[in-house]
Image: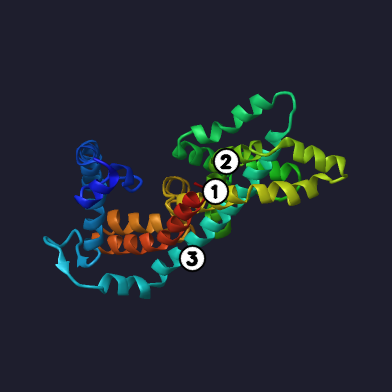
Amino acid sequence: MDMATTHQLGTKNPARRKPGYLKRSDRRFAYLILAPAMIAFLVMVAWPFVDAMSMAFYQYTIYDTEPIFIGFENFETILTDPYVLGSWVTTAIFVAGTTLLTMFLGLSWALLMYQDFRGRAVFRTMTLLPWILPSTVSAFIWAWMLNGRYGIVNVLLMDVGAVNSPVQFLSNDVGAMMAVILTRTWISIPLFMSFFLAGLQSMEFQQIEAARIDGAGNLKIVRRLILPHLKPVFLVTGALGMIGNLQQFDIIFALTGGGPVRATSVLSIEVYKQAFQNWNLGMASAIGVLWVFTLMPIVIFYLRSLFRED
């Protein structure tokens, strides 16, 4: 039977199937192997997310035997409470400070590790140490180093004459914020350095050599060649860093507990306090919902950047 006869009889021509088209038996097999993952996703992710979203519209504290539907009252309370609203400002300062500092130091360290010098493999391995340690252990290490009585940071500052008396870093607003930013940055540098170093190694080294022959200095090479080449890496690492820093909890809780006087009380700390100190699950869920909408634009930007690179 030729092609014309097949067309006249109305039968489908397999050669004209759309790209990605699967036969019915193949589709059934695909659904079968996807079923466990989909069930796990629905049970472990989708259902808790929907339950938390719905809880935001209820008054549900430890004193209530049953949740009481109150509509948008929790959201109205959040938007009129200066302390809760202040946690968004605190979160923005922490995320911006940590992301920018990590990107700058991660790129600087990657440029150093890109050079060929003796012992480079040892330095690269040592760079990964902060990433290997658990976050709470890192937080306690920095709490010890920044201690106002016996911390090594104060000893060094006094030895070089930068300060005349020990600084209570964790007892004042600025010092506590600097401490959590430094600790988070210290942990994140290895990951960012790896991204930037991978981007640098994808460059043609002959380009840099040709620029040097033409008389370009190091700063000009970085500005004209390296930074434009690393633009996709900047976009992805920036978005990834902001998402991770927006979700940060354990370092801040172990280092300052959100204090002093809410100076480091970011959104994650505020949700914890509402849920497990005030036992107000409805309010904690409402903050969580607004937190999701805060994260959503960054997540969309990150995914679009990934798909664009693909």
216 left or right, relative to 9: right
40 left or right, relative to 115: left
- Disc 3: which residue: 89
N-terminal of the pair, mark 3 or mark 1, is: 3
Cα gap from disc 2 to disc 3, whole angstroms = 29 Å
Residue 236, position in %: x, y?
A: 53, 50
The answer to whether 41 is drawn above or below residue 65 in the figure is: above
Q: Can residue 231 be seen in this view?
A: yes
User: Looking at numbered disc 3 in the image, what kind of residue is underneath it?
Assistant: Val
Q: Which of 178 and 79 is in front in this view?
A: 79
Which structural element holds mark 2? helix
N-terminal of the pair, mark 2 or mark 1, is: 2
Residue 205, position in %: x, y?
A: 73, 36
Q: Nearer the viewer, residue 230 or 120?
A: 230
89 left or right, relative to 27: right
Residue 25, position in %: x, y?
A: 19, 37
Residue 110: give its label.
none
Q: Residues within 10 Å of mark 1 (few under 14, many from 20)?
A: many
Q: Residues within 10 Å of mark 2 (few under 14, many from 20)?
A: some
User: Looking at numbered disc 1 in the image, what kind of residue is underneath it?
Assistant: Thr
Residue 151, position in %: x, y?
A: 60, 41
Cα gap from disc 3 to disc 1, whole angstroms = 22 Å
Q: Quadrant of the N terminus?
A: top left
- Disc 1: which residue: 237
